[in-house]
Amino acid sequence: MSERYEFIDMNETGPRAVRTAFANQVAYCRANDARVTARVVAALASLLDKPESEFARRIAGWKGAPLADALPLRAAGGIHALHLSEAAHELAPIYADSEDINDEAVIAGVVRRHDAVLLPWLAGPPQTNEAGRSSNFIAAMLWLADQGLPPRFECMEIGSSAGINLMIDRYHYDLGGVHVGPQPGAIAFAPDWRGNHPPMHKIEIASLKGCDVAPVDLTDPAQALRLKAYIWPEHEIRFARIESAIAEAQEAKPKLAHANAADFVEAELAKPQAAGTTRLLMHSIVWQYVPADQQARVTAAMEEAGARATPERPVAWVALEANRTVHHHELVVRYWPGGEAPKKLAHAHAHGAWVEWLV
């Protein structure tokens, strides 16, 4: 199994695309300090050689585009859920990263025994909500305020999953020495900051609302388990964060709508905007999951809103997404009027461990 990331068309289908998607996921996990997840994905890929279960056959004969569908993460999430629920004790040595384990044999046995339980994990996209990404959103707001946009933000997020980043006003941030948010905050973030610190400004978050095609209710233990299953087990701090987010959601649920990205953005942009408020679209590690026709609608809606924007009622777009050509994540901002061209502010770790500020 190759550990070299191979660039392929996100929409490519067929057996080769399935194998490449798994190989790429292994390479991606290893590059992001996720050795255990890489082991699980590699072992799952070995099932493609001789699929003996419906789960394996469904993966091998995947009808969609496996890279765009994040097929390896769907499968790995199901395996991790079995481990978290203690339904497959034989997985424990792998998740403990023990040596001298025949990963392929263990995973093959688990899949045979839990075939029916695993199949539903292939039915929908992974939920990769991560509170650590909110540091990027806050840094972008500071930069936008520095450009002269009103520092009062009306935030709308697509692909919100459980809405963890719809509670960013409850968290505290130390961004290279620039502090934002309540102290101590429901969660405190101090990513390894590289480069200059972001501009210092007092910002206000006037509102937060988001959408997802399969929203997760953090207050439902079964749904919370599903979200935890998509967290890479090596990243223990992320489990602590999600427990804090669950506690916050129990206090006051985030405003989360069941809707696709295009419908949501079009509806929100059609609403009146208060003077002295910046209307901000934000999203992180979700664009690849948005169908092409919806991407086009979101882009058109933002550009149309931008054409109507004024200095008193500006519009901004903040995206933390993977650049699959160079294989890292980039924080990119556009704003109207005056900043229509995309501006790359930072490179960033997918889960918030570090930010490399570029401006």
Image (tube, rainbow, N blue to C red):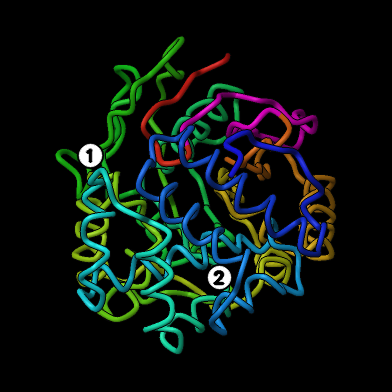
Badge 2 vs badge 1, beta-carbon distance below 8 Å: no
Instruction: Say few, some or many: other residues with alpha carbon within 10 Å of mark 1 (under 14 / 14 to 19 / 20 or more).
Output: some
Residue at 75 percent across and 56 percent down: it is: 17
Where the C terminus falls, by quadrant?
A: top right
Q: Which residues are magenta?
A: 326-349
Identify the residue under disc 2.
212
Residue at 55 percent across and 57 percent down: it is: 157
Relative to residue 61, is residue 341 depicted above or below? Answer: above
Where the N terminus falls, by quadrant?
A: top right
Q: Secondary structure at mark 2?
A: strand
Tell whether position 341 is magenta. Answer: yes
- Give residue 71's position: percent from left, percent from top: 60, 64
Instruction: Say few, some or many: other residues with alpha carbon within 10 Å of mark 2 (under 14 / 14 to 19 / 20 or more).
Output: many
Towards the viewer: 352 or 70: 70
> Which is nearer the N-term, disc 2 or disc 1?
1
- Give residue 358's position: percent from left, percent from top: 57, 15
